[in-house]
Image (cartoon, helix red, strand yellow):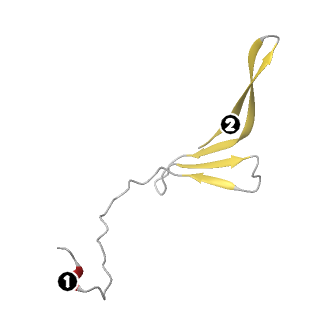
Amino acid sequence: MIIRYNVVSKKTYQKDGAEKAAWLQVGQLIRFDATPDKPEQFSLELNMFPMQKFYVFAPKPKVETPTPIQYPQDAPQEDVPF
């Protein structure tokens, strides 16, 4: 099942001494249900980019690995302080 959501921007203004809001539609977010073969997916369509779709993914957890210190191959060993 596909579900569409409006993507809007809120603009506030004053009218007759009261603050009002105008909601400007800037695009749509489209949700595709998960299937046995694929996880749930999202697509973002912005009106200012009419021929471009943006795909939305959950961030993958970062796996941090320590970067080993690399010394130049021609560095003399006696110059290393340890």
Residue 78 badge: 1
61 and 76: which one is in front? Answer: 76
Q: Nearer the viewer, mark 1 or mark 2?
A: 1
Q: Which mark is residue 5?
A: none
Residue situated furthest bottom in the rendering: 74
| Image spot of residue 51 (x, y percent) | 76, 56
- Graded by Cα atoms within 10 Å as few (under 14), some (14 to 19) or many (20 or more), the crowding at tag 2 reads some
Residue at 71% across / 56% down in the picture? Answer: 52
Quarter of the image where one finds residue 62? bottom left
Check the image and report above or below for 75 versus 49. Answer: below
Query: Circle 1: is it few (<14), some (14-19), or many (20+) Cα within 10 Å?
Result: few
| Residue found 76% across the figure and 48% down from its top | 48
State the SS at label 1: helix
> Where is residue 71 shown, x and y percent of the image?
30, 79
Q: Nearer the viewer, residue 4 or 8?
A: 8
Check the picture and name the quadrant holding the N terminus: top right
Horizontal relation, residue 30 to residue 11: left or right: left
In the image, what residue type sits under mark 2? Asn
Q: Amino acid at mark 1?
A: Glu
